[in-house]
Amino acid sequence: MSLLMNYEDQRFTRIAQMVFEEQLRRDPGLESQMDERRRKMMYDDVVYNLSFLMTSVYFSDGRIFEGYARWLYELLCNLMKDLDRDRIMEIMTGHYRIMSEILADHAPEILTGDELGKAAEYLDLAIAVTTEAVTDIELSTSFSEGDYYDIRKAYLDALLRSRTKNAHEIIRDARKQGVPLEHIYEKILRKVMHEIGELWHRNVITVDREHYATSVTQTAMSGFFDEIFESPRKNRTLIACAVGSELHEMGIRMLSDMFEYQGWDTFYLGAALPGQAVVEAIGEHKPDLVALSVTMPPYLADCERVVKAIRAAHPGVKIAVGGQAFDTTDELWKKWDIDFYSPSAGELLRWAHKTFAA
């Protein structure tokens, strides 16, 4: 029992050192991410983790270590901003498994069988709460409100846990269950990706997680292409793009897909498109409507220049603008020579339906 309460005992420090070395051996990538400061912090954390576990065992109270594991995970997420929450979860759950193995192999002479059983049980609890904590994050009110919250949350959780196959299945199943395609795009995918952007902005997730979520969502959208392009044609044409140096294209691509689904012929020109290229594309395809998207405020000036260039070269074409950048302005679009500002694909579709009803 002395090991349980005497954390300077050489047997205790020997086990801590074994756990530390085994974790680095099993996870070479982790060692490459550790400078000397982080190595020392990691070893100190191993000692601290064992001390909490031993205290929990001593008092036969699993909640002590369970609560500690949950607190530790969030602390590490805040301290190690360059690592994704999912990556930190992998590190910590692997750490708890190593602790369990080392204790089982090297502590029987200093812990009773009952104590070893409790240690294993409490480490399993720590693994469970740490795994759950990956998606146990504060979400925005706008994300939580409205229809299909359960589907949105399940899809977001799959993205945060790197479960690509599960994410695709969630979206496919939603469509099979009768969720309209417009709602999948507008009320599920768009809102999830907006939340992903907010989580990155709050430094809750890393940029690589945001890019991963974008890639998975683009692939999920591509699964509906057959259905989208089977729609009867309306003899209307849309050109859509993100202008200037804007690289964020998810929203404008969703809009393009929804117009295609409604029977329009769409020319989605992608992101970071020069203004002159937009003007030339209009001359080639003779669209009824041009939709321009801006996500980052620094590119609003680029968008304004493109609007002016379009008006000068093609005064008769309808122009719509949208994107998150406009949310930061005092209704800036009212000062531009455009036909419609739309905060969402759905609103632009409704406006286009009325405007081009003839």
Image (spheres, rainbow, N blue to C red):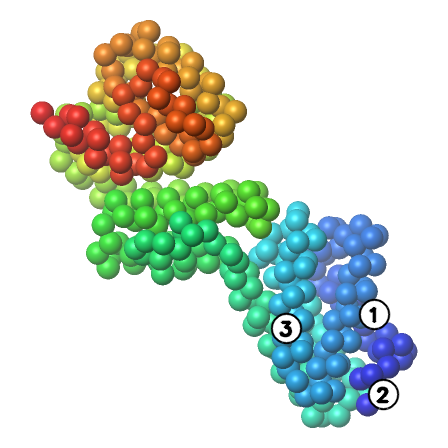
Kindly identify the amino acid type of the residue bearing the numbered disc 1: Gln
On screen, residue 26 above or below 209 = below
Residue on which disc 2 sits: 2
Cα gap from disc 1 to disc 2, whole angstroms: 18 Å
The label number, if any, that marks residue 332 in the structure image: none
Crowding around mark 1 (Cα neighbors within 10 Å: few <14, some 14 to 19, many 20+) is some
The residue at 56%/64% (across/down) is: 133
Q: Residue furthest top?
A: 312
The reply, left or right, for residue 194 in relation to residue 109 is left
x and y, in percent, of residue 62 in the image: 64, 82
Total marks drawn? 3
Tell me where residue 311 sits by quadrant.
top left
Tell me where residue 305 sits by quadrant.
top left
Residue on which disc 3 sits: 67
Residue on which disc 1 sits: 17
The residue at 73%/50% (across/down) is: 33
Determine the secondary structure under disc 2: helix
- Between marks 1 and 2 in the image, the one whose residue lies nearer the viewer: 2
